Image: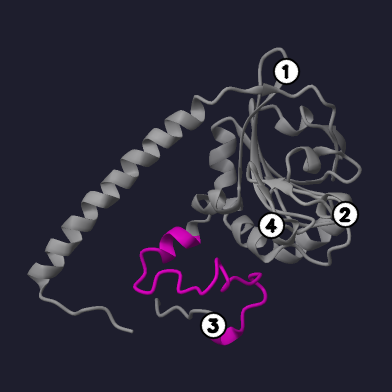
Amino acid sequence: MQNQVVSREEWLEARRALLLKEKEATHLRDKVNAERMALPWVKVDKDYVFDTPTGRKSLSDMFDGRSQLLVYHFMLGPEWKAGCPGCSFLSDHVDGTLPHLNNHDVTWVAVSRAALERIEAYKKRMGWKFPWASSFGSDFNYDYHVSFTPEDLARDKVVYNFTAIEPANANDELPGMSAFYKNEKGEVFHTYSSYARGLEEMVGTLMILDRAPKGRNEEGTMDFIKRHDEYAPAQQASSHCH
């Protein structure tokens, strides 16, 4: 279906009207960002231990010498053969940001409940470089409401995205991102978490598609996404630059 075709003058009028709304959205985003930074914090007193390629590490160790830590809750359960396609899509955007994040006193790490060897194998398949740790045997994923036990899923409701939802709408693993701060005393604080579509702004491809003529061209949320090594060759764009 093709949009209405109009004169350049009519297009400019419509575009300027949309620009006003885009500016409103930008200003609202600025306000939301300010309120996000003003959120109160919760001190993390529980000891969490993770398996990493360089040995067992505490949550404090995961900061890697920096004061800020972003943990991406990557959907890869102990019995899963491959990582979630949506989480993989988001993670395709991470490696290029690492030098900038690290220089800005921020450490990024993915965490999954799968065993480290399974994580390492999938990470190698995808060609990623970002840090990725296993929380297997830890309460971490459960405490941050991204993993659910069979007992959880047997209940009437489970909590995800700060809301009680039907278990039928939840897998044993769901995506999210949590932020932490460590002060000079070494105390760790949970400052923020986001789930579901709250993660979309971290996916640059979606933001680019929103500006393309057909947008995301989806029937369900991100139903067009595959792991980057699973697209048919005909779907991959060829370059005409020489």
Identified at 66% across, 58% down, the residue is 87
Secondary structure under the numbered disc 4 in the rendered image: loop
Q: CA distance from mark 4 to mark 1?
A: 30 Å
Q: Which residue is mark 2?
A: 150
Q: Nearer the viewer, mark 4 or mark 3?
A: 3
Q: Earlier in the sequence, mark 1 or mark 2?
A: 2
Mark 4 surroundings: few (<14), some (14-19) or many (≥20) residues within 10 A: some
Nearer to us in this view, 28 or 71: 28
Amino acid type at circle 4 is Trp
Q: Which residue is mark 4?
A: 128
**For residue 153, what is the image quadrant?**
bottom right
Q: Which residue is mark 3?
A: 235
Nearer to us in this view, 157 or 216: 157
Q: CA distance from mark 4 to mark 3?
A: 22 Å
Q: Nearer the viewer, mark 4 or mark 1?
A: 1
Q: Which mark is residue 187?
A: 1
Q: Earlier in the sequence, mark 1 or mark 3?
A: 1
* Vertical order, 150 against 98 (above or below): below
Q: Nearer the viewer, mark 1 or mark 2?
A: 2
**For residue 64, what is the image quadrant?**
top right
